[in-house]
Amino acid sequence: MIVDDEWPALEQMQGLLRQCKGVGDIRVYDNPREAFQAAAEQKPDILFLDIQMPELSGLTFAEELLTFSPETDIVFVTAYRNYAVEAFELSAADYLLKPVEPMRLLKTWNKITARKVPPVAGAGQGTSAAVRVLGGYELTGPHGPVKWSTHKAEELFAYLWIHRQGSVSIILNDVFPQWNYEKGKQYLHTTVYQIRKTLKSAELGEQIELAFDRENYRLESAGIADDISRFQEAANAALQSEDPERLQNAASLYGGELLQPLDSLWVYPARDKSRRLYLKLLEELVHGLLQQERYDEAEDYALRLVELEPLEESYVLQLISLYWRVGKPLRAQRRFASFRESYMNEMGAELPAWFLEEYQRLSGNL
């Protein structure tokens, strides 16, 4: 598809394109609004788009079209060099200056069509599609780990995978806080376009859909295994059953903190939620194992709690109590002394009175 408000430019570009190998149907439009409606419905493979047009500029045209046709490769065609930065911020496939030279157009055509050649059948097949967000972050497709075009695309996909949906305003506040609304919105749509292209390239476009409706983005997936859902489902079921074996199995699915490589503010509430669920599993495990007098196993999980929350008084006291119960007084005393020192260094105060009284009771010194 070619869109330009000047017919001589349309005819010239049409004639040049017909000289390119593999060109199919060429549709031309001199009215940008009619062209936009047609492009949103027809979703052309390649769009050659003038920038300076009345009523609807090429940059605005492209930004809005990305929502409806993310797979369209857009080539901006203009007489002005000063739009190059804005064009490539919209992930333009190329940027051509008028008058367009035949060899320059051929280079652009070959570059775009080479990317569209389908992969060899059977190449790299067999890898299951999966998302890992615990203890790391990786999306895997049929050809292995997915490589993201930008860090922001990688982060936005993680955000939508965790939240599944979000309005434009909320996403801008969480993921693009450094931008003003209009600039951020443009950057958001560009990043969504990059995600869609990446998913298609990784042959995940049919399994993961990123939809847009009424200023709201929604991510839907089918047949994609992910560790966070598996962990949450197993943990909630195990907590209801109170069975130590099921609690242990669920705890084993926690691979580490959520989205460890990411350090954005929006990550922390989600990370804390999965971490608290894991802590709850460990608490119930220690309680259940103690009831069954499985002290060695209980000690292992009690130690994990202390390692995760080293200044949580109740966890340390539980471990000390366990040591006294199983006849390990030296470990109890060393743990108390170590905790007391750490607490005073971190908090700048003595241990709470209730903690000291309970320790004295356990040690028989009250």
Image (cartoon, helix red, strand yellow):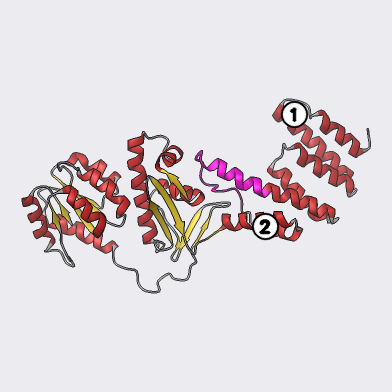
- Amino acid carrying label 2: it is Ala
Helix, strand, or loop for circle 1?
A: helix
* Position of 215 relative to 28 (above/below): above
Query: Viewed as shown, does residue 358 lie left or right of 114?
Result: right
Q: Secondary structure at mark 2?
A: helix
Identify residue for label 2: 237
> Is residue 96 something that shows in the picture?
no
Q: Is residue 364 visible?
A: yes
Where is residue 174? Give x, y as percent.
46, 39
Q: Which residue is mark 1?
A: 344
Residue 294, compared with residue 318, is above or below; it is: below
Q: Is residue 142 left or right of residue 329?
A: left
- Looking at the image, which residue is at 60% across and 45% down? 273
- Residue nearer the viewer, 61 or 356: 61
For the residue carrying disc 2, how many other residues have a C-alpha within 10 Å: few (<14), some (14-19), or many (20+)?
Answer: some
How many angstroms separate mark 2 from mark 1 (CA)? 39 Å
Q: Which residues are the magenta region?
A: 255-278
Instruction: Tell me where residue 241 appears, x and y as whole percent.
Output: 73, 57
Question: Can residue 258 be found in the magenta stretch?
Answer: yes
- Residue farthest to the front, as pictured: 214
Disc 2 vs disc 1: which is toward the camera? 2
